[in-house]
Image: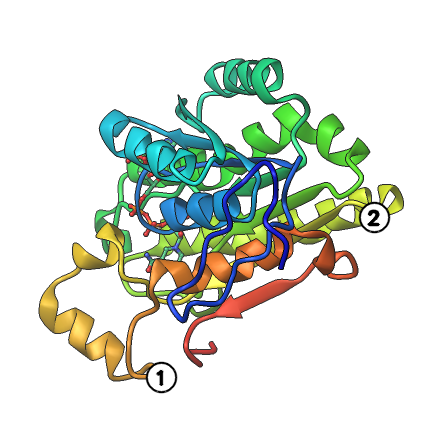
Amino acid sequence: MMESPLHQQVHDKEGRPIPLDLEDTTCVVTGASRGIGKAIATELGHRGANVVVNYHSSDTAANTVVDHIQSTNGKAMAKAADVSDHEEVAAMFEHVRESFGPIDVLVNNAGITIDRRFDQLTAHDWSRVMEVNLGGPFNCTKACYEDIRSSDHGRVINISSVIGQTGNYGQTNYAASKSALFGFTKSLALELAPHGSTANCVAPGYTRTDMVDNVREDIQDRIRSKIPLDRFATPAEIASVVGFLATKRSSYVTGEIINVNGGLNG
Ligand SMILES: NC(=O)c1ccc[n+]([C@@H]2O[C@H](COP(=O)([O-])OP(=O)(O)OC[C@H]3O[C@@H](n4cnc5c(N)ncnc54)[C@H](OP(=O)(O)O)[C@@H]3O)[C@@H](O)[C@H]2O)c1
């Protein structure tokens, strides 16, 4: 494959060149300082995209992701904003537009858990998870909807979870926020379709990030024993599916829920 004059080609772990199929594409990834979001931002950067690494409070971690993308001549910037805060989100997107132009791809990845059995769950536990996991995708999509609609390959990619399909003990709030993303995505897909833009959901299974590392070791073992592939995903395995959805090659895929869960179907 020809070297791009703009970007340095990066190779995957098996030494295969990663195609530079996102050059001149601006992508915003929420919650990209750590875990799955970090892997997604890196994947999109390696494919040549201009990447916005959104985060909440981990400045140093977000800047490390930016430095890594820039080390392959990619364009990237870190931008702090609480996705649950409508005004912070609007300001972030204005700043992105000034630096990179209109947004083509939005990856709504930022998410949190506040796990408690329902009888102990407070109204705050419920609303905070909803504000971030569902309000965040609303705020971010709202702030760049016109860009996505008019892009020649506009993409909204929502990161849901297998828990939105199966439910989980102690996660009524999280499961509700994640299954709500399915309805949000399918409806958005119908409204974007006449403009040639798409909306899809990726539903990861258990993935090796802080979110899973914080689960008790014996519970992790119990979960792993139920996964047909007998292991947790790596963040890069989720990111490679998002990478495909972000490119023009996914042009006829919309309104889908793509499970990346090692066979753990609900
Ligand atoms: N890990 C799994 O097993 C798994 C499975 C299925 C689905 N998912 C979903 O995948 C997504 C990423 O999960 P993860 O495991 O990578 O999480 P993680 O390691 O805990 O990282 C969460 C990311 O979200 C950011 N974030 C949190 N609250 C935010 C807010 N209010 N505004 C902006 N950014 C915020 C964090 O930023 P700071 O670093 O600044 O705090 C961080 O970058 C989530 O939506 C999660 O529900 C995860």
As displayed, is residue 234 above or below residue 86? below
Quick one: SS at disc 1? loop
Residue at 32% x, 32% y is: 62
Q: Residue 5 appears at what percent x and percent y?
A: 61, 38
Q: Which is more toward the observer, 46 or 87?
A: 46
Residue at 40% from the left image edge and 71% from the top image edge: 14
Q: Is residue 254 left or right of residue 93?
A: right
Q: In the image, what residue type sits under mark 1?
A: Leu
Q: Residues within 10 Å of mark 2 (few under 14, many from 20)?
A: some
Which residue in the protein does label 2 denote? 193
Spot occupied by residue 203 in the image (x, y as percentages of width and height): 49, 62
The answer to whether residue 35 is left or right of residue 99 is: left
Classify 37 as above or below 201: above
Check the picture and name the quadrant holding the N terminus. Answer: bottom right
Mark 2 residue element = helix
Relative depth, front residue between 17 and 87: 17
Marks 1 & 2, CB-CB < 8 Å contact: no
Residue with the mark numbered 1:
229
Residue drawn at the location 79% of the way across and 43% of the way down: 192
Kind of residue at disc 2: Ala
Give x and y (percent) for residue 261: 43, 72
Q: Is residue 183 visible?
A: no
Q: Residue at x 24, y 59 (%)?
A: 212
